[in-house]
Image (cartoon, rainbow, N blue to C red):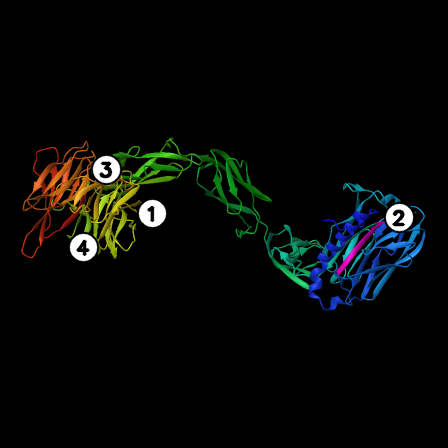
Amino acid sequence: MPSAPATRPNPAPARSRLLLRYILLAQLVVPLARTQLLSAQVVSEVQVTPETMTLGVGQKQALFAAAFDQRGNLIPNAKFTFRSSDTLIAQVRKDGTVIGVKPGLAKIEARSQGRRASMAVLITGGGSSSGSTTRAISASVLTLNPASLTLFPGETARIRAQALKDDGTPVSIGPVTIKSLRPDISRVDSGGLVTGIAAGRTIIQAAAGPLMATLPVDVAVADFSLEPTQLSLIAGAADTLHVRVPSQGNRTLRAAIQWRSTDSAIVSVTAGGVVRARMPGRAEIIASVTGQERRSEVRVAQAPEAIVVSPPQGGRLQIPLRSTRQFSAVAEGADSTPIPDAQIEWELSDSGVAQFDRATGVLTPKTLGTVTLTARLAGITPAVWTVEVVPGHIVVEPSRVGLLVGDRATLAALLRDQDAGSTSLKPPGLTWTSDRGDVALVRGQGQVEALSPGHAVITAAAPWGKEAMADVFVVADLWLSSNRSGAYGVYQLRSPGPHGLLPVLVDNANNVQATLSPDRTRVVFSSNRSGNFDVFLMDADGQSLRRLTSSPSHDGEPTWTPDGNRIVYTTASGTSTHIAIMENDGNESRQLTTAAGGNHSPTISPDGRTIAFVSARTGNHSVHTMGLDGSNQRRLTRSSGRETTPQYSRTGDLFYVAGRGGGSRGSRVMKIAARGGSSSAVLETEDPITSIAVSRDGERLAYIVGRIRDARGKAQYSLYLQPLGLRRPPVQIPLQPGEQLSSLSF
């Protein structure tokens, strides 16, 4: 920003510009005035500029006055009074503006705290007789560039004076007189070269006829830094060090610096900070400014004789999209010693195909195509790689598969494009493998056959080294809880034989009410492993357990929505039991029921719209229904007996257990057809049924019967599989003596 200048005769602009100059000056010297407040209050010297003035009658020009304390510091808030020795010849206003009245000679005096300075004013009969004044009359303002200076002692800077018209366009003027008010702090020559002499502040004044401009100069010794602090070069190479001043806007100091090397045989330095490596070794470059020193360590390595690269060059290197590849090039000396300080220059032929990070050596493909990467080192044959970007990553879909023993499925390996995600393109030449051939076998182009319960990882490998995997979980279709190992654990029924129950999760906790996800890859269940019963999630092989609920209540009876995205469960606190729903990651849990009397045993219709559950809100445990969001709650069954464990089949039929009544302890399995109508009995038992489950294909019904076997109330449990739609007797599954079962699920 240019300094506030004096103006040619024009009363209103002159006053405003003069005021602006004083404001600018005050802003620049306020910090100094604050730090030296006591000593800066007493005026020791007054100076005026210019020293002489020539005006025509009626012409005006501003007088500039400055006050200094006994230490030579500028006083920014000094107040002046101005007086003319003959007001009939020249008058002076309170702001220092001098006005020519009639031809003659007068003296203008500026006073502050008893100190004074004066200048002579010659008033001519017409305009000024000075040729420079005549040329300057077309100019409106005089500016100095830069508007201010901050220098170290001994540092130089050049200023330039420029006259401007009212519209801001430059105009040529005559000679410009430039001087420093404190040459002991900073001096200036006639060409505008300013030199810092000693610490302090001063004003540089420039005058051309009636125009005048000023700029503040601050000469100060400040802390500086030398950058970089460490430098690595090879013999014969050069680099430049820079001295910067953080407190002065981190500007670069280019003068008043003395440079030297601690060992010029290893490294030398010029007056401009250019460092040149001579021979291997270590040395320091020292920059000295006004008694301060900063050092930079320079390491010089031997000249390289070769480049060692990775990966090897030659041929075409295939890199898939959405992957990266590390490249390295290290210089070596004649004795094969690595020279990590040697500066390798990297070049990439087409940044549209790939991008290369020179700092890390990582190449990242952007699109299909071919690109050349080159590593160069002066005097060494360049290393060149031809990189072919191939269709990027591959994915296997689906990434998780659940199969019953004997089932088959086909996995698809697809190319993944950087922008579009998975595509329908199938990569050629894939190799398929299974890490558990006894669990799942893979053939041909991803055909998987489930052999026995367990977890297998199927891998598809591309010719360019990229792999993709899918998890295959082979399961039995009936799941239940048993105490055969002590605490209740999660089992699956592989076959009806005595050893058909296979443990999935058996530990010291009670793990009950397990339900397979719709895709048969995950299991949601209830466990007291954390104290209260909470809902947990695990893979179908019993691994990767994750807790979904952690409330003070007991949570259980989880069941999946058909899309597998949400879980409906029962939460019980004290005597209050309600149905709730949450996302399959445990988030956004929300209670669906509020009615008293207990609400439990939820099951979800195959279309995902309706929840059937048991509630005693009307006094009797009966089957109720509601929407998935908890809306439209209503009683579905109207019998007077106790009803429990509702279960939807895949066809939409609703099964539930009802007491036989009439003094019998037995149960009936009832069915309400999906098309509506009254309920009908499917089967009857002489002892109570504690749990039922309907197979996903709707062809089988599993149920558990409990029978009190002695006077102490111990129960004997039996497990049956009943074919539906066929008049066949149920098949009993052998159990261990005293084994207790619960919570069946297909």
Q: Which residue is mark 1?
A: 587
Above or below, 639 against 261 in this view is above
Q: Which residue is mark 3?
A: 605
Mark 2 or 4: in front is: 2
Label 2 crowd (10 A; few <14 / some 14-19 / many >=20): some
In the rendered image, the quadrant that contains the C terminus is top left
- Where's residue 507, x and y in %? 22, 54
Between disc 2 and disc 4, whose residue precedes?
2
Between disc 3 and disc 4, whose residue precedes?
4
Label 3 crowd (10 A; few <14 / some 14-19 / many >=20): many
Mark 4 or 1: in front is: 1
Q: Main secondary structure of the magenta part?
A: strand
Q: Is 14 in the magenta?
A: no
Specify start and end residues of the magenta stretch as a single range: 201-210
Q: Describe the element under mark 4 as helix, strand or loop.
A: loop
Residue found at x 68% / y 59%: 260
Mark 2 or 1: in front is: 2
In contact (CB < 8 Å): disc 3 and disc 1: no
Q: CA distance from mark 3 to mark 1?
A: 22 Å
Between disc 3 and disc 1, whose residue precedes?
1
Q: CA distance from mark 3 to mark 2?
A: 104 Å
Q: Name the disc covering residue 58, or none.
A: 2
Identify residue type, mark 1: Asn
